[in-house]
Image (spheres, rainbow, N blue to C red):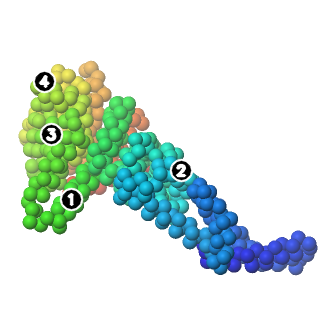
Amino acid sequence: MAQDSVGLPSDFQFWMRKLSVWDLASTLETQQDTCRHLPRFQEFLRQLYEALKEMGLLSHILSTFRFDIKEVDLFTQVLGYAPTDYYPGLLKNMVLSLVSELRENHLNGFNTQRRMAPERVRSLSRVCVPLVTLPDFEPLVEALLTYHGHEPQEVLWPEFCDAVNEAFLLKKISLPTSAILCLWLRHLPSLENTMLHLFEKLISSERNFLRRIECFMKDSSLPAAACHPAIFRVVDEMFRYALLETDGALEVLAAIQVFTRCFVEALEKEDKQRCQENQRGKESFQQTALKQVDIQLKFAFKTYFPYASPSLVMVLLQHPKDIPQGLWHQALKHISEMLKEVVEDQTHGSYGGPFESWFLFVHFGGWADMVAEQLMTSEAEAEAPEALLWLLAFSCSPGAGHQQRAQTMVEVKAVLSCLMKLLRSPTLSARDLQAAAGEGGEGAPRPPACQQLIRRLLLNFLLWAPGGHAIAQEVITLMAQTDAIMHEIIGFLDQTLYRWDHLCVEAPRSRKLARELLAELRGQA
């Protein structure tokens, strides 16, 4: 900027002479001269605009802190500097000086003689509202967000926090996670607006695009900031409210699972860094330090999931990828037994009702979404395990009573039995699959949750059965009678591919079919 502005005074005189000449006569020669000089004139106007803008910003800041811009001009002229040379450097140095002063506040503690007054901090944050997206002001914005005073009330101007959060969401400003964490801890509306921004994406442009949702979450720093229990609890409560308001919408469930996976990754990364610091700092006490970290981590989970059984949380935290695939069946059975004990045994009332247990379970999509798949890919001769049937029934309808859940298990078991017979059939047809699902019968209609569960079984059958690819499109056409069911099927396919990618599931034929169906259905939606 300073380099661009060096010749502004002489350029100004040049262009004033040119304009006077152009204004006096309108001849072919002046028109040609105008066309020839027009690009240079546009560049001059750009430089003039930038200089005026920077002078205006500087005047705004100096006036806030009771400096007179005329006095600055006089002082710089005595030193031999032109204002256009000095303003950019002065602005940069002023920002660095304010940053240093704000950081000294944290170091000086209660030493009031060397601390910036709260009124000055508040005034500075107010001044910075229109400046937060300018790169030169990023250090000052970060210093204000991480400012720690001893005032009983928040000193930062609320509009400043709103402006920073909006700029961060729109990627107009780059800030470290530590600064964003401070922003959300001291200004709850900013965190709430970030979550609302996420929900808007879930129901619009990013619907059924889990990869994009994951990228947005990581870019937003939500999972990393959620390592602070206070942030996690707010985010989790908003997810809970969204689930209740949307009657368990699949998009919200998928977002919870993506968030939890990213959150656990961030927590493990933070824990690993802490261990490395302990190893570097106290090598001789390495084992003691690691034990202390492990204990702290377990206690921390109680603050993240206060209504859940600690032992159940630790089991669900095991990533399926870290367990041999042949043992997934056994792990799901163990999870089912623990959940059933909490849900149906009244002595565990301290862990909340069935909804709390279900809400915890659906956080961990690596387990929650593989139950139907495991039932479908188990040995054809083996009878479906009761534990997995119970887990499947509970996952689709946590509010159902014992009798209704038992009825769902009976219906699912009957459908599974028919599907297993079809696996051994030399020929498959869409009508056979429809009959196996019990559709079109004269019995009482199934509850919506049970119908959704049956559709999930049919989709898993299509992906894994040897002849499923030949009838997949016809079956889905029969199933997708409404737009809601169409989006449900799209969500299932997207979520399945996302899970397989993270679990490194090797199933080339199933993957190919899922991708083809997903691409075709997205084109129709």
Please say if the residues under marks 2 and 4 sit with CB atoms less than 8 Å apart. no
**Residue bearing mark 2:** 123
Determine whether the residue tagged by mark 3 lies in a helix, strand or loop: helix
Labels 4 and 3 touching (C-beta < 8 A) = no
Q: Nearer the viewer, residue 304 or 295?
A: 295
Instruction: From this view, report whether residue 346 is shown above or below residue 116.
Output: above
- Going from N to C along the chain, the mark reached first, 1 or 4, is 1
Q: Earlier in the sequence, mark 1 or mark 3?
A: 1
Give the labeled residue for mark 4. Answer: 346
Q: Which percent across, then down, holds residue 245?
A: 38, 30
The quadrant of the picture occupied by the N terminus is bottom right
Q: CA distance from mark 2 to mark 4?
A: 57 Å
Residue displayed at 65% across by 61% down:
68
Where disc 2 sits, the SS reads helix
Mark 3 or 2, closer to the camera: 2
Q: Which of the two discs, 1 and 2, sits closer to the camera?
A: 2
The three-letter amino acid code for the residue at tag 3 is Pro
Figure quadrant of residue 246: top left
- What residue is disc 1 on? 274
Question: For the point 46% across and 46% down, which residue is it?
Answer: 155
Residue depicted at x 68% and y 70%: 74
Give the quadrant of residue 34. Answer: bottom right
Of callouts 3 and 2, the N-terminal one: 2
